Image: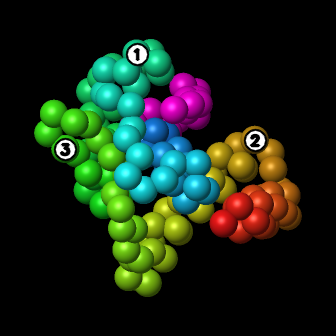
């Protein structure tokens, strides 16, 4: 699985892994039942400490996105139940806040960010 880490972003590495896995699931690049790389394999490929991968996988598991099967590995869960509206709103607001902070740091305008979001949204919908 290809993930791109930005060591200068200020966002923790484990969080970058979590967000990229979530995006890959949402966009259909990873499907339900698919196995994620082992902790050692991902740590080796990304050149990071295995504990960072463990932390990312634990967060994905607590969010209900993955399940760990003893001796088999980590798998994307079969059912992705919808979040309650309040929880979903807070999660999206948190992601938007991180996105806007980074976009602002890069010098992007609000209009540019909106246009990009719309473009990505439409692209994802076409794939579904």
Q: Secondary structure at mark 1?
A: helix
Q: Number of callouts in the render? A: 3
Which mark's residue is nearer the viewer, 2 or 1? 1
Q: Is residue 126 left or right of residue 9?
A: right
Residue that mark 2 sits on: 106
On the image, the x and y values in percent for residue 101 come to 63, 51
| Residues at circles 2 and 1 in contact by the CB criterion of under 8 Å | no
Whether the magenta-drawn stretch holds residue 9 is answered as: yes
Quarter holding the C terminus is bottom right
Q: Quadrant of residue 80?
A: bottom left
Q: Nearer the viewer, residue 111 or 43?
A: 43
Question: On the rendered structure, is 86 left or right of 63?
Answer: right
Is-magenta flag for residue 5? yes
Overall secondary structure of the magenta section: loop
Separation of disc 3 and disc 1 at Cα? 21 Å
Residue topped by disc 3: 69
Label 1: which residue?
44
Q: Position of residue 121 (x, y in %)?
A: 72, 65
Question: Compared to 41, does 96 lie above or below?
Answer: below
Q: Nearer the viewer, residue 79 or 46?
A: 79
Q: Secondary structure at mark 2?
A: helix
Residue appearing at x 46%, y 18% in the figure: 45
Mark 2 and mark 3 lie on one chain; the one further toward the N terminus is 3
Q: Which residues are magenta?
A: 1-14
């Amino acid at each position: 699985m290809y993930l791109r880490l930005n060591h200068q972003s200020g966002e923790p590495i484990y969080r970058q892994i979590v967000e990229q896995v979530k995006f890959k699931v949402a966009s259909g690049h990873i499907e339900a039942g698919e196995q994620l790389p082992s902790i050692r394999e991902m740590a080796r490929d990304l050149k990071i400490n295995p504990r960072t991968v463990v932390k990312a996988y634990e967060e994905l598991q607590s969010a209900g996105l993955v399940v760990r099967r003893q001796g088999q590995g980590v798998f994307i869960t079969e059912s992705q139940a919808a979040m309650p509206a309040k929880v979903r709103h807070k999660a999206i607001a948190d992601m938007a806040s991180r996105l806007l902070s980074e976009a602002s740091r890069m010098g992007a305008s609000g209009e540019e960010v909106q246009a990009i979001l719309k473009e990505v949204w439409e692209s994802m919908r076409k794939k579904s």
